[in-house]
Amino acid sequence: MIYLQIFWAFFLPGILGYGGGPSTIPLIEAEVVDRYGWMTTSEFSEVLAMGNALPGPIATKMAGYIGYEMGGTLGAAIGVFASVAPSLVLMIGLLGLLMKHKESPKVKRMTMIVRPVIAALLAVMAYDFFIESYQGPGLLQTLFLAAASLLLMEKMNVHPAYVIAGSLLYGAIFLG
């Protein structure tokens, strides 16, 4: 029964919390503190502070922690899944709708407009990363990691996840 409660405690705020993490926090508090009594308001505020100190979405971090406290590892997995399930279901539904109407002139125009915007956003992000890397570790380290990444992914067909992990390891050893 606890697993079902964990699921509903994080699924409902995910559905009702329009606007992302900040809007779901009061809803999560209402479920965790008021409805189920798993924590006091003080304990919840400590979990919230801990979640804010870590990178990533606040709702999923809180769901994982509170789910673990209430139901162990399975409780954490259920809590995290429940917090992302509403977005997951909506994305699958929207993608299904787009795929169904992919031949529609309106959908084709929409995707033609969105593609350059996404490319521009990615270019700006890459430029910002390059400048930050250039100012931090330096041009030589930046060029080395860029060239090694390009070689590994394009010529040797290494999966990007392994390249990222290798870059993190390189940074920890040589730049840390």
Image: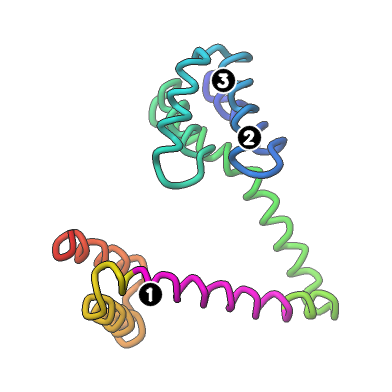
Q: Is residue 160 left or right of residue 100?
A: left
Local crowd size for mark 1, using a 10 Å CA cut-off: few (<14), some (14–19), many (≥20): some
Residues at marks 2 and 1, CA–CA distance in whole angstroms? 34 Å
Q: Residue at x 24, y 74 (%)?
A: 138
Is 76 inside the magenta-drawn segment? no
Task: Pick the quarter of the image with the N terminus.
Answer: top right
Callout 1: helix, strand or loop?
helix
Residue 126 rendering spot, x and y as whole percentages: 45, 74
- Which of the pair 122/95 is nearer the observer? 122
For the point 70% across and 63% down, the residue is 95
Q: Nearer the viewer, residue 174 or 168?
A: 174
Q: Are marks 1 and 3 in contact (CB under 8 Å)?
A: no
State the separation of the CA atoms marked 2 and 3: 12 Å
Answer few, some or many: residues within 10 Å of disc 3's Cα (few below 14, many 20 plus, some between 14 and 19): many
- Crowding at dot 2, Cα within 10 Å, few <14 / some 14-19 / many 20+, comes out as many
On the image, numbered disc 2 is attached to which residue? 24
Label 2, secondary structure: give it.
Answer: helix
Q: Earlier in the sequence, mark 2 or mark 1?
A: 2
Q: Identify the residue under disc 1.
A: 130
The answer to whether mark 2 and mark 3 are in CB contact below 8 A is: no
Q: Main secondary structure of the magenta part?
A: helix
* Distance Cα–Cα, label 1 vs label 3: 42 Å
| Amino acid type of the residue that numbered disc 1 sits on in the rendered structure | Phe
Relative vertical location of residue 42 with respect to residue 3 in this rendering, above or below: above
- Name the residue tied to disc 3: 32
- The correct choice, above or below, for 18 with respect to 103 in the image is above
Q: Nearer the viewer, mark 1 or mark 3?
A: 1
Quadrant of the rendered image containing residue 151: bottom left
- Please tell me the numbered disc located at residue 30: none
Query: Quarter holding the C terminus?
Result: bottom left
- The residue segment tinted magenta is 112-132
